[in-house]
Image (cartoon, helix red, strand yellow):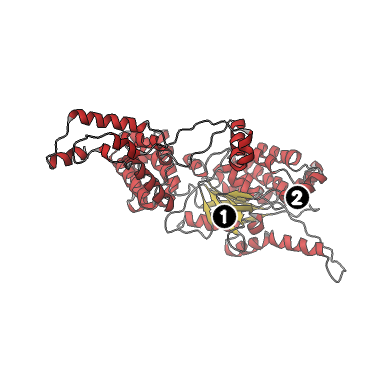
Amino acid sequence: MFAAHINRYFGTAADTDKEKSGDKLERNFKQLPKHQNHREVFESKDGLDGLFHSSHNATHFGENYFQMANHVNQYFKGEALEEHYLDENMTEVDSIVKPSKVKKTVSLMDCLLHPSSAIPDILNTYLRTTQVNNVTSTRTTLNKKYLSKRQAEEATYNLLATLEQSSSSEVLVSCIEALNHHLIRYPSCRMVLWQEKTAVLLLRKRRSYKHHKHLQNAIREILALVGYVDPVKGRGIRVLSIDGGGTRGVVPLQVLKILEAQTGRKIYQLFDYICGVSTGAVLAFMLGLARFSLKECEDMYHRFGSEVFRQNPFVGTVKMGWSHSYYNTETWEDILKEKLGHRLLIKTARDELSPKVSAVSAVVNWGTSPKAFVFRNYNHAPGSLSRYAGGSGYQMWQAVRASSAAPGYFQEFTLQGDIHQDGGILLNNPCALAVHESRLLWPHQPFQCVLSLGTGRYDSVKRSPATSTSLRAKISNLICSATDTEGVHTLLDDLLLPNVYFRLNPMMSAVVSLDESRPEALETVLGSWGRAFSYEQNNGLGIKCSIY
């Protein structure tokens, strides 16, 4: 069309038959062998009138366009092309760029003369693999959608415009689900929703469609994504914090059993915020999000002892030197995937009864010292900045796996370029973190109950007569100081009201390791807990945690 327009402008006639011959030449050009010179073809076709004609151009504009676009975008790490720039002609041009794959026979002489090129051909033929083409298809590149910040914001504005104009519930559901998917991929775009005051519109829609379950779930998710939080249902904020401690996690299970028995409610109904680290994260996610019963949780701890914490000493020693983990990490991951699944944390906000839940890990490749990382099923509102890094776009099993990656016991967990280890090496008592996060979520509401559950402690009353300590004792003291939980308790006991803050961490009669798997040892732990926890204490807690 461009050539015809120029020809008409200069008054140059173009013969119809010769135009057809030019079209025929273009079709023949597509069938040319790769090695044939383009100029030879054009010189052999004489007598083509017209000042400009597409057949006069030996340069393939479509090919150059795609190559230049891909080269520039790859240099700046951007997209190759936008979809609306493509048409069918350019798709045909791209098919010309791809070289035809011709199977060639490789002889023994070729292997001797050119081993570097012939041997891979033989292997590819044997394995029936095809060589990867260096020229990336344009359409394949377009399928990988990575929008820039400006493009992502423009897409957000378009979705918001559709949301405001939507009148039917089906269109609303589709639009909000698209927004949810978009905000998960581009979290920074939630600032656009706050600037446009979309939360007010969403709350109005939620009130108008009370009986539309799917729409209500979608609205709850998008409100959680943008950082909006509904007020608590009780008189104040009720917080549950669970320490780390391996198989000693059966200890906090006992007090939770008593609370459920006295109140007649499940744990996820009793608390607004549940936080855990290591084995506490396992309980927090299983009780708060996955809705397992306490009996199922207790059975799983016995499964830990029989499947996870059983290892041949020789095999464990070899694994320790090879992968820095004494036990089989794959077995632990399989159990987590089976129990918790691959659901994203933020997706749990779709359930109206789900509390705010978090798990704490330690990222060890951010600078010289480990940094706390919080896996959340919520987001903070813009302007409410947490002291702790974290995110809500992770799968449930990944969060618990990262929080329970105890050094020496399991392998560290790499997630999106970050190396996670057990959060207990930093915050084995996450109660202070739970108070901090709760204060950001509900800044204008008081605390009704803050319950901190430990996994038991042991301290010998005997004084050693030695004048110096051994290397083993020095290392043991270092580990104990790093995983100490009572320092946080002392601080919170002074800051919070006595009728609000409760700490239950019984004294053990013997040392119980994190990987204890003997049933008799676990029975000793439960016996110590029963003696430490009196009826008067749990009765007061039951009243505080109930919903009125």
Q: Is 316 left or right of 157, judged from the image as shown?
A: right
Task: Determine the image quadrant of residue 176.
Answer: top left
**Amino acid type shown at disc 2:** Met
Of 386 and 538, nearer the camera is 386
> Can I make out residue 292 in this image?
no
**Amino acid type shown at disc 1:** Phe
Q: Is 40 left or right of 345, judged from the image as shown?
A: left
Return the residue found at the far right. Answer: 465
Residue at the image point whose x is 86% and y is 71% from the top = 467
> Can I make out residue 96 in this image?
yes
Dot 2 alpha-carbon crowd within 10 angstroms: few under 14, some 14 to 19, many 20 or more? some
Residue pointed to by mark 1: 373
Of 256 and 415, nearer the camera is 415
Return the residue found at the far bottom. Answer: 467
Residue pointed to by mark 2: 320
Residue at the image point whose x is 19% and y is 41% from the top = 51
Q: Tag 2, which secondary structure?
A: helix
Q: Is 343 left or right of 320, judged from the image as shown?
A: left
Q: Position of residue 502 (x, y in %)?
A: 63, 55
Residue at the image point whose x is 87% and y is 69% from the top = 466
Dot 1 alpha-carbon crowd within 10 angstroms: few under 14, some 14 to 19, many 20 or more? many
Q: Is 58 left or right of 432, judged from the image as shown?
A: left
Which of pointers 2 and 1 lies earlier in the amino acid sequence? 2
Q: Tag 1, which secondary structure?
A: strand
Residue at the image point whose x is 33% and y is 51% from the top = 197
Of 355 and 342, nearer the camera is 342
Q: Position of residue 363 (x, y in %)?
A: 60, 56
- Point out which mark residue 65 bears: none
